[in-house]
Amino acid sequence: MAKAVWNGKVIAESDTYETVEGNIYFPENTVKREFLRPSSTTSTCPWKGLARYYSVVVDGQENQDAAWYYPDPKPAARKIKNHIAFWRGVEIEK
């Protein structure tokens, strides 16, 4: 079981997840969408492709670009399609 927690709230929780480069990627259906706000931020990884971001909002506090995902990952990263990862102070418990 893995959990993503920020500001005292569980944002994601799942028995199944993918680990890539030390990051836990949660299946998107295990992420509580009410805590995510779309961001215009993007970045590019040479082997995973284009990443898009969400800000995490809990009790009126915003953690800018604290979640990311690859909407159309390159073939080498296909196992993280439809998955979301967290950073910037979001605690990941395993």
Image (cartoon, rainbow, N blue to C red):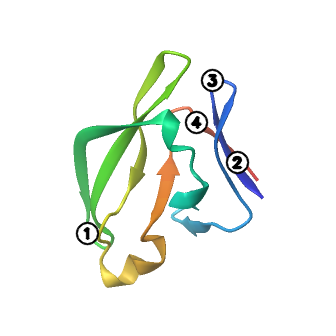
Label placed on residue 7? 3
Above-or-below relation of 82 to 11: below
Residue placed under numbered mark 2 in the picture? 3
Q: Secondary structure at mark 3?
A: loop
Q: Residue at x 49, y 15 (%)?
A: 60
For marks 1 and 2, the one nearer the N-term is: 2
Q: Are marks 3 and 4 in contact (CB under 8 Å)?
A: no
For marks 1 and 4, the one nearer the N-term is: 1
Residue placed under numbered mark 1 in the picture? 46
Tell us which disc is closer to us: 1 or 4.
Answer: 4
Q: Residue at x 24, y 41 (%)?
A: 41
Residue placed under numbered mark 4 in the picture? 90
Q: Secondary structure at mark 1?
A: loop
Q: Residue furthest top?
A: 60
For marks 2 and 4, the one nearer the N-term is: 2
> On the rendered image, what quadrant is the N terminus found in?
bottom right
